[in-house]
Image (cartoon, grey):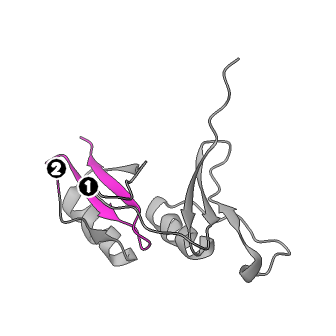
Amino acid sequence: MNPLFRVVALDCPEPLTLADFYSKLSGLAVEPLGDFPPTDVTWIELVNEGQPTIAFQKVDSFVAPQWPEGPIPQQLHLDFDVADLDVGEEFVLSLGATKAEFQPGTTFRVYLDPVGHPFCLVLVT
């Protein structure tokens, strides 16, 4: 048996806010709320039509991971392919990301989302 990979979930203090950030970054829509008031949302996903997606889970005591190392390790990060690192950087910074001080490579760049999760833009040619 091979279980089907479907979702990567990111802990965060405000699922709708972080879902909105990653929606703008990835171009994927945030799933409809239906009858749930925004204040009751503790889990929400991006819509990716049968493909793996990103979910956001509310954690009241959320503490941001530290990059590249520290007492609260990153544990995971997401990679997004781009054709131009400078254009990609301008885009993610306009969404509210910050560029990590430590940059270990030249074909990718590390950023922090609005609550501190590291993610990378990876140059593809």
Which amino acid lies under the numbered mark 2 shown in the image of this protein?
A: Pro
Residue 24 relative to residue 74: left or right: right
Q: In front: 114, or 124?
A: 114
Q: In front: 103, or 47?
A: 103
Which amino acid lies under the numbered mark 1 shown in the image of this protein?
A: Pro
The residue that appears at 33% across and 61% down in the rendered structure is 66
The spot of residue 102 in percent (x, y) is 17, 59
Q: Which sits earlier in the primary sequence, circle 1 or circle 2?
A: 1
The spot of residue 116 in percent (x, y) is 39, 68
Q: Quadrant of residue 91?
A: bottom left
Q: How many marks?
A: 2
Q: In front: 53, or 10?
A: 10
The spot of residue 23 in percent (x, y) is 53, 65
Residue 114 relative to residue 85: left or right: right
Q: Is residue 99 magenta?
A: no
In the rendered image, the vertical position of residue 89 relative to residue 123, given as above or below:
below
Which residue in the rendered view is the most extreme toward the right? Answer: 35
Residue 36 relative to residue 5: left or right: right
Q: Kindly identify which residue carries mark 1.
A: 68
Q: Kindly identify which residue carries mark 2.
A: 104
In the rendered image, the vertical position of residue 21 relative to residue 2, given as above or below:
below
* Eye-nearest disc, 1 or 2: 1
In three-dimensional space, the C-alpha distance between marks 1 and 2, rounded to whole angstroms, equals 9 Å
Marks 1,2: beta carbons within 8 A: yes
Q: Quadrant of the N terminus?
A: top right
The residue that appears at 66% across and 21% down in the rendered structure is 2
The magenta segment is 103-125
